[in-house]
Image (cartoon, rainbow, N blue to C red):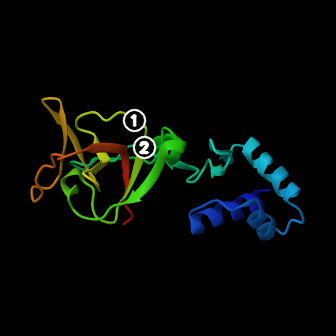
Amino acid sequence: METYKNKILEFYRQSRRMPSYAEIMAMLGFKSKNAVYKLVNKLIGEGVFDKDSRGRLVPNALFSEVPMLGLVEAGFPTAAEEELVDTMSLDDYLIDNKEATYLLEVKGDSMIDAGIQEGDLVIVERGREPKPGNIVIAEVDGGWTMKYYRVTNGRAWLEAANPRYGPIHPEQELKVAAIVKGVVRKY
């Protein structure tokens, strides 16, 4: 069972999508889609996978749990002992609503002073009402961007986190598609 789960998750990591039942059948050497159906239901029962609102298979534990060993001082060095404090699923920490959450790769440097650099991945969530100060993914006058959401005198506008870029006041329309929930950077 563990081998089957790992093969399916490896497919997901490489393809960035879940395999179809036919692909699972071929990958695992099953002779029927019914065998795949039974395996998938067993893995859903164990909490490894789930189905989204459209009935598509989604992984529940992309990152699984990682040990949390305590705090690290970012100021002056202090004595520290490694102690297992807890474990944490990064999915649980970063994602509130899995069905409304997706990743976008950042291009450009307009949010650099917010700690968001080109090449980073931002975790964004659709369907939430933006509040002033949120970093949002928005369509403004037909173009897409990521900026701070601001409101002045009842009018929404966007602000970069880089002094090289001026404010964006929509001429016609500003639609917020999603709110940035987190940033992922690989070193």
Query: Does residue 176 appear to the left or right of 26 in the view shown?
Result: left
Residue at 85% x, 59% y is: 33
Where is residue 143 shown, x and y percent of the image? 28, 56
Labelled disc at residue 72? none
Secondary structure type for disc 2: strand
Q: Which residue lies furthest to the right in this view?
A: 31
Q: Which amino acid does label 2 sit on?
A: Glu
19 or 152: nearer the eye? 152
Corner quadrant of residue 46:
top right
In the picture of the structure, the residue carrying the numbered disc 2 is 125
Q: Which amino acid does label 1 sit on?
A: Arg
Residue at 84% x, 50% y is: 38
Where is residue 160 shown, x and y percent of the image? 18, 51
In the picture of the structure, the residue carrying the numbered disc 1 is 128
Secondary structure type for disc 1: loop
Q: Which residue lies furthest to the top in this view?
A: 154
Is residue 88 visible in this depiction of the protein? no
**Alpha-carbon neighbours of circle 2 within 10 Å: few (<14), some, or many (≥20)?**
many
